[in-house]
Image (cartoon, rainbow, N blue to C red):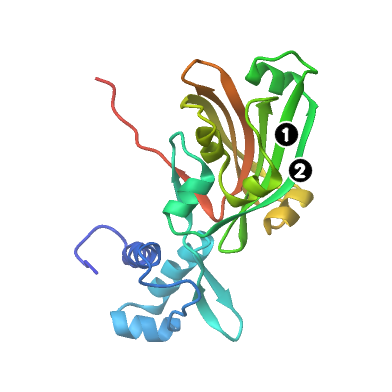
Amino acid sequence: MDRSSPVPLYYQLSQQLEAAIEQGALAPGSLLGNEIDLAGRLGLSRPTVRQAIQSLVDKGLLVRRRGVGTQVLHSQVKRPLELSSLYDDLEAAGQQPATQVLRHLVEPATARVAAALGVAEGADVVLIERLRLAHGEPMAHLRNHLPVGLLDLDGGKLAETGLYRLIRVAGITLHSARQTVGARAATAEEGARLAEPEGAPLLTMERTTYDDAGRSVEFGSHIYRASRYSFDFQLLVRP
């Protein structure tokens, strides 16, 4: 701890604990010492330690369990904002991704889906609806629409890997995408599906993806648990 720094001590401690969780030094399920022990070992006041722990509880990295103590949860997924699939990003981060395929069918395109995919409203499109999990916990509810005939899909393949990987295997080169990120409160149904209470904050994302010929090949409408997930931006100053 740098006591000469203008950065509050509780924040310094929370950053060090968060880094230890992200790097695996504090493994999921491990217990922190109680506040009195931590304060004594670190030479900090108990309120300082309590504030640092509470900030990580609020981020979903720690949880206080009655009769157990303060326990480390899985680290929050920080996804770079680039043209990649959630499955691949989770796999690269060692998060043990899994998929439950909820629906896979052909349906008429709504006006919104038709505009994104460049087809007529009411034309047949493929709907894929999935629940993405990491370490057995729900992370995101994914709805993707694709043009009919784009590629051959079955439920087994969709449960085993990511959609973008299957698109690339089919010989389609993904080139670019338009994406909108937002936030809103969870409905009761969404909360039950994502293990969050009704009204919990959710991140939303809509993305239309294009191949190297400029065709719209996929329109995604996804929701993510804000307690377990964030987007990571790099911002550059214009010359």
Residue drawn at x 63%, y 39% is: 222
Q: As shown in the figure, which amino acid type bears the numbered disc 2?
A: Arg
Residue drawn at x 74%, y 13% is: 120
Residue 208 in the image, given as x and y percentages of width and height: 57, 26
Which of 26/38 is in front? 26
Residue drawn at x 50%, y 65% is: 74
Which of 180/167 is in front? 167
Q: Quadrant of residue 25?
A: bottom left
Secondary element at image label 2: strand
Q: How crowded is mark 2: few (under 14 residues within 10 Å), some or many (20 or more)?
A: few
**Pointers 2 and 1 in contact (C-beta within 8 Å):** yes
Residue drawn at x 45%, y 70% is: 53
For marks 2 and 1 on the same chain, the one whose residue lies earlier in the sequence = 2
Q: How crowded is mark 1: few (under 14 residues within 10 Å), some or many (20 or more)?
A: many
Image height check: is 136 above or below 29?
above
Residue tagged 1: 127
Residue 146 in the image, given as x and y percentages of width and height: 66, 28
Residue 99 in the image, given as x and y percentages of width and height: 63, 52
Which of 210/33 is in front? 210
Q: As shown in the figure, which amino acid type bears the numbered disc 1?
A: Leu
Secondary element at image label 1: strand
Q: In which quarter of the image is residue 40?
A: bottom left
168 sits to left or right of 142: left
Residue tagged 2: 103
47 sits to left or right of 170: left
Which of 126/41 is in front? 126
Image height check: is 153 above or below 226?
above
Residue 80 in the image, given as x and y percentages of width and height: 42, 42
Q: Quadrant of residue 14?
A: bottom left
The total of numbered circles placed on residues is 2
54 sits to left or right of 23: right
Label 2 vs label 1: CA separation?
7 Å
